[in-house]
Amino acid sequence: MSGSGNHHHGRKRAKFSGSLGYVLAVAGSAVGLGNIWRFPYLAAKYGGGMFLLVYLILVVTFGYTLIIAETSLGRMTEKSPVGAFQRFGRSFPFKFGGWINAIVPMLIVPYYCVIGGWVTKYLFEYLRGQAAAMATDEYFSAFIANSPSAEFWFALFALMVFLVIIAGVKHGVEKVSSIMMPLLVVLAIFVAAYSVTRPGAFEGVKYFLIPNFENFSLMTVVAAMGRCSTPCPSPWASFTPTAPT
């Protein structure tokens, strides 16, 4: 690596323009539909406050260790996951570790593009004033049963993601994250504020925030561990684009 610095094959590596952009991009790779959509369901199923307590303990131990280790490897090697692991050796464990870190995000992307296509479709119809129609039980089933329509929105969302990546770290990922992450926070606050106005909401809040040790089980730990590993940013987020020193 002598003389490589921030250069790779003669080109200067892309960097974030500032620490805020890096944090927002990493948060964007971590805080997604799984945390907003699946987390409440898991919390309700596996103990409410007990699940939340176990989750927080795992986040500040297991999750924090993973994110620091992953980010440190990226900052030190300034390479992709495959190249970063090969920096320490070319034996099978290092090759396997690098490739599994590179392949897993590739396997996740199509799944999220399907979900992203659904979200894009609903946003489009909402802007068209179709909110009442979308609220019916039949609307979603009819939408996903219509293969050409579902595939169109999948392809459209995948194209948007591709264009963001092609735009690069600073003008693509960072710029989009600086807009969408604050918007996500605003929407989350709005949804939370609306939710607590619903009948019986405070019983749910109490169940979610107050641990009850009678609800603890092995599955509480397993489910919380599964969600805890998700907030760690993808290898692409911490390995490839380097944060400013």
Image (cartoon, rainbow, N blue to C red):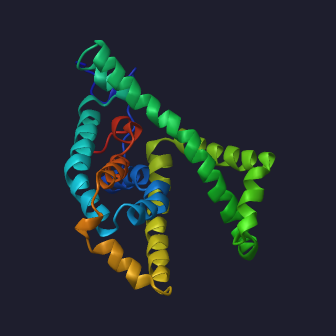
Foreground residue among 138 and 26: 138
Look at the picture and state if 238 lies above or below 95. below
Residue projecting furthest to the front: 214
Look at the picture and state if 88 lies above or below 231. above
For the C terminus, the image quarter is: top left
* Rendered image quadrant of residue 69: top left
- Asked whether residue 164 appears in the rendered view, the answer is yes
Residue projecting furthest to the top: 91
Q: Position of residue 113 (x, y in %)?
A: 60, 46
Foreground residue among 108 and 90: 108
Q: Position of residue 221 (x, y in %)?
A: 29, 52
Going 73% across and 49% down the picture, which residue do you hit?
Answer: 150
Look at the picture and state if 157 lies above or below 70. below
| 102 lies left or right of 74 | right
User: How many numbered badges does the structure rendering display?
Assistant: 0
Foreground residue among 135 and 168: 135
Q: Position of residue 95 (x, y in %)?
A: 34, 18
Q: Position of residue 205 (x, y in %)?
A: 37, 78
* Rendered image quadrant of residue 169: top left
For the N terminus, the image quarter is: top left
- Asked whether residue 80 appears in the rendered view, the answer is no
